[in-house]
Structure formats: C-alpha cells, structure tokens
Image (cartoon, rainbow, N blue to C red):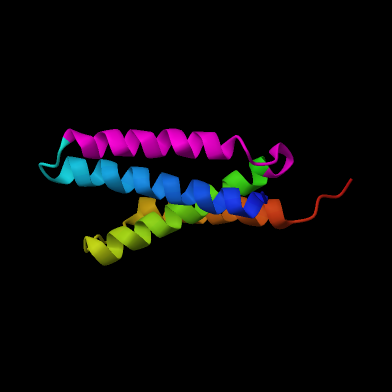
Amino acid sequence: MSNIFYFILAALFEFASFYLFWAHSSSDKSIWITIAAITCQFAFWYVVKKIDKSLLRKAYILYSSIFIVSTLLWMYKSENFSPDTWDYILVGSALTGIMILCIPRIK
C-alpha cells in the first residue's frame, strides 16, 4: 500500500487514541475507553512501522507540526481555550521546522 494511506491511517489512530484518553479523563467513562485508547496507540505504532523509512523523518516532523496546530485549533473551538504566548511560540517553532525541511540543501 502507499505511504500516504499509512500516514492517514496513522493519523486516525493517533487522534482516536488521544480523544479516547481525553474522554476517559474528563468524565467517568468506563475503563474500556482507556483500553480502546491503548489499542489505538499500538495500532498507530504498528502502522508507522509500515512507512518507508526514507520518508519518515520529514513526514513525522510535518505530521507533528500539523498535530500541534490542529490541537490548538481544537482546544480553541471546542473548549474556548485562548492560546498564550508559549502556545504561539510552539506553533511558530513547529512551522519553522517545516520551512527548514522545505528549503533545498546546498551540497
């Protein structure tokens, strides 16, 4: 299968695991929610192992940056969270990392 499919699948498993951990910690949900979250995290690790290793470093930095930005947007929209200076610094450093990766290297 293609690497793009694995990246999308990995993202779905990771978001699902974080959401399930959040759901369990924010309310009195069953322990089965935590077991499902752990299962999703193991599935994420398994799927990541399927991705071509030459692409993984750059893709993981990109993926992590997207995760940071989308998490802040989620918190802003769903929990009325107002980002502070440190949140903006985190997003800025993540986006800087993406820009550094996109600049062609001179050899």
Q: Is residue 104 left or right of residue 38?
A: right
Question: Residue 45 colored magenta?
Answer: yes
What is the x, y in percent for residue 58?
66, 46
Q: Magenta segment, principal secondary structure? A: helix
- Position of 65 with respect to 26 (left or right) is right
* Residue 102 visible in the displayed image: yes
**What is the magenta range?**
31-55
Q: Residue at x 10, y 41 (%)?
A: 28
Q: Position of residue 68 (x, y in %)?
A: 44, 52
Q: Is residue 90 visible?
A: no
On-image quarter of the C terminus: top right
Please identify the residue farthest to the right as the structure is shown.
107
Residue at point 41%, 59% (across, down): 70
Which percent across, then down, holds residue 91? 46, 55
Write the residue at 46% across / 37% down: 43
Task: Say if 36 sits above or below 69 in the image.
Answer: above
Q: Which residue is located at x 22 percent, y 60 percent?
A: 79
Is residue 90 covered in magenta? no
- Say which of 85 and 1 sits in front: 1
